[in-house]
Structure formats: structure tokens, C-alpha cells
Image (cartoon, helix red, strand yellow):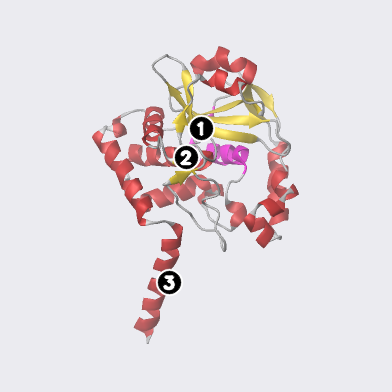
Amino acid sequence: MTRYIAALIILFSLKLSAQVYTDKDVEICNSVFTFAVEKDLGSKPIGDVIAAVGKKFLGTEYVGFAIEKEGEEQLVIHLSGLDCTTFLENALVFSRLIKSGRTDFMDYQKELTYVRYRDGIIDEYPSRLHYFSDWIFNNTEKGIVKDISEEIGGTGIKFNVGFMSDNPDKYLHLAETPEFIPVIKKQEEEINLREYHYIPNSMVEKLEGKINNGDLIAITTNLKGLDIGHVGIAVKMDDGRIHFLHAPLAGAKVQITKDPLPVYLSKVKKHTGVIVLRPQEPK
């Protein structure tokens, strides 16, 4: 009887795992690690690794809300379709693993959890770093990235976030579990007390030379209640300019902008500037 119960527990656990990722995700994960070995990426600076891994995902379909699942919060992996944040997260996670010589799918799951969740711990829906400014703050504290916006010439900015708590109907888990709303509201208040630094659109071209290949770019927005409207990766192209590698929007695929970053920013009215994050070498 005890063995029977134990077997049921194992099967139940496997079923839960199957809901989190698919065989296709494991295949893509392994293909990235194989690519890293072939290109000897482990010997390169982490910024160059991030740029190379990001380019590996060129042509991947944009899929929004792919990590939103009903029920309790769990790590959801969806590598066959990415939004802007999951694209950036995965490029960063894979690169940290490649640099540290950890190339097992279990290592990938652990590292993705560490980056995606507050202090690396899954503890219900609010533990996920929903606002990217909060993602910046927490992953800076972890030593994963360094916000270099101020040191390269950026100016101070304070956010006034509140979109999630003001629009709980737009979020599956907030609609399902209203008691999460005050927790999110408190997180928003904490974000709004912090001072960040950013480079306004008008200054990006002047400071472009201080942005490195593989730096992470968070684009600030003028949309009410939000902080960051889009994220991606800085890549230096053959023209010597910094372009933007990103998962742009529904109906599109992961791509590199034809225009240099300053020109791209100027063409989107909701974009107001950038926060530049420098990935840190894993210890």
C-alpha cells in the first residue's frame, strides 16, 4: 500500500512537471547548450554570450501571456514562443549557465526561477517580478545585473506604477484571487518610493558609444501606471552602431531593428528613454 501511494505521488509530480514545460522546450534548451559548445561561448565575455544566444532565437514567434497558467504559481517554460520579457530573461539565464559551465535542464530551471522571482523563491503569484523596474531592483541586489544608466550620463526618474492594482480584471491571477491585489499594491508603493536613472530619448545617440554589445535595455514609457514598456538586448552591428534585438509584438518574430537604437526609439511615441543594465559575470 505504501509503495502504491508513493507511486501515485511520483506520477502526480510528473504530471505537474509536464504542465510546466514540454519536450520541445527541453529540445530547444539542449540545442542552445550545444550551440554554446560549438561556438566556444563559455570563453567569451557574458555580454557577447547574451548577444549570441539572443540571435540564436531570431525568428522565434512572439507569444504573449504564455507563462500565465491557471492555479497555483509555478515555473512555466515556453521556449517555442517568447514575449519581450521572457526573451530577455532566457538570453540572460542561458548565458549565465554557459559561463558557469552548468548545462543541464535542471540547472536551467533553477536559474530561471532565480532570475524571474523575487529573491529567487516562488511563493504565489506576487512573488513573480511583474514590473520590470522591480525586476531591475531585485536582480541588481542579486548581483546579476548592474544598472549603469547613471554612470554613463543618465538622469534621475521616479515611476508612478499602479496599472496592475488598478486593472485586476486584466490579470488572470488577480481576477481569480483578489486577496493578491493588496500585496501587488504594496509592491507598487515600494517601487514608487525608489529613484531610478534613465537616458532620455534625446540623449541616447550622444551616449550610444557607452552601451556595450549584450547590455540589457529597458525602455521607459509614458503610458499611465506603467514603468517599462518594452525590453530587449543591445547588439553592435556591422555599421558600428547599437541596434535593438527584441521580441516586438504579436504577429511578429524575434528580430533586430533595421535602425540604430536612437532612431528606433524616436519612431515610437510611447518610448521615452532607456535604462541600461550591464550583465555581471556569474561567480
Q: Quadrant of residue 39?
A: top left
> Percent position (x, y) of residue 163?
71, 44
Q: Label 1 to label 3, Cα distance in Å?
A: 37 Å
Secondary element under disc 1, as helix, strand or loop, is strand
Task: Give the residue drawn at x 56%, y 22%.
Answer: 264
> Percent position (x, y) of residue 157?
69, 28
Question: Upstream in the sequence, badge 1 or badge 2?
Answer: 2
Q: Amino acid at mark 1?
A: Gly
Magenta residues, as a range? 131-147
> Percent position (x, y) of residue 213?
43, 24
Quadrant into which the C terminus falls: top left
Task: Give the residue drawn at x 72%, y 39%.
Answer: 225
Instruction: Mark 2: give few (<14), some (14-19) or many (20+) Cα within 10 Å.
Output: many
Q: Are marks 1 and 2 in contact (CB under 8 Å)?
A: yes
The answer to whether residue 96 is magenta is no
> Percent position (x, y) of residue 170?
67, 51
Q: How many marks?
A: 3
**Residue linked to disc 3:** 12
Q: Is residue 29 left or right of residue 210?
A: left
**Residue linked to disc 1:** 232
Q: Is residue 225 above or below residue 153?
A: below
Q: Label 1 to label 2, Cα distance in Å?
A: 8 Å
